[in-house]
Image (cartoon, rainbow, N blue to C red):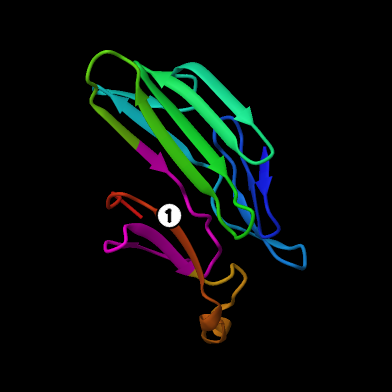
Amino acid sequence: NILFNTEFELEITQRLEGGGRIMFPNYSSATFNGADNKFYISVDGKNYACCRGQGANFQCEHRLYQTEISEEFDGVIVKIRIFVPIAGAKEFWTVTLKNTSNCEKNIAFYSYFPFAYPGHMSYEARYDEQYGFIYQTGFHGYTKYEDKANAEAKTRYRYCISNQKPNSY
């Protein structure tokens, strides 16, 4: 499925893989994130990879405005919804977990969103503890070292919100 607006495009598969691209007025684009998104759930100590055939009742619904995935793991339903808003170079992912069993469950959910490798100038990634997000800064992938000083004002920022400090970034 391709979710898009005039500034951003996201290709997404039923395995929730796919990369986003920032669109420019001259019809060129810049890769925003990698295509290797992964989601994991742990239910009472058993670990599963979402959208990889390990759950039951898997459903994927692609619509013009969103993609929604639903899958069940040991009595816990995972719903993941992805959409691109009407404006802005953004993509939104929401995850809902629902315990449908009659007993209490110990549940943990993890996600992996790689930022795209922009090129030889390399971006820098940091975690902002005050606001709880990972951000990456850098220059366009084709910026030469000798042009770095002139490109300082054109630094790009990419964000991923997190409810806790990640193990690595």
Query: Which percent across, then down, holds residue 162?
Result: 35, 51
Task: Report the front residue among 81 and 9.
Answer: 81
User: Does 69 appear above or below 64?
Assistant: above
- Is 105 located above or below residue 119 in the figure? above
Quadrant containing the N terminus in the rendered view:
top right
Image height of 75 relative to 154, above or below: above
Left or right of 21 on screen, residue 158: left
In the shown orientation, is residue 5 left or right of residue 134?
right
For image coordinates 36% across by 58% down, the residue present is 133
Q: Is 135 inside the magenta-drawn segment?
A: yes
Viewed as shown, does residue 63 lie left or right of 139? Answer: right
In the image, residue 19 lies at what x, y percent? Answer: 59, 47
**First to last magenta residue range:** 110-137
Who's the residue at 68% across and 54% down the image? 5
Q: Position of residue 111 (x, y in %)?
A: 40, 40
Dividing the picture into quadrants, the one containing residue 97 is: top left
Amino acid under disc 1: Cys
Count of residue discs: 1
- Indicate the quadrant where residue 145 lies: bottom right
- Kindly state the secondary structure of the residue where label 1 is placed: strand
Residue at far right of view: 26
**Front residue of 2 and 154:** 2
Position in image of residue 149 (x %, y %): 52, 86
Farthest residue to the bottom: give it.
150
Q: Nearer the viewer, residue 26 or 91?
A: 91
Q: Residue at x 67, y 49 (%)?
A: 4
Where the C terminus falls, by quadrant?
Answer: bottom left
Q: Which residue sits at x=55%, y=32%?
A: 68
Circle 1 residue: 160
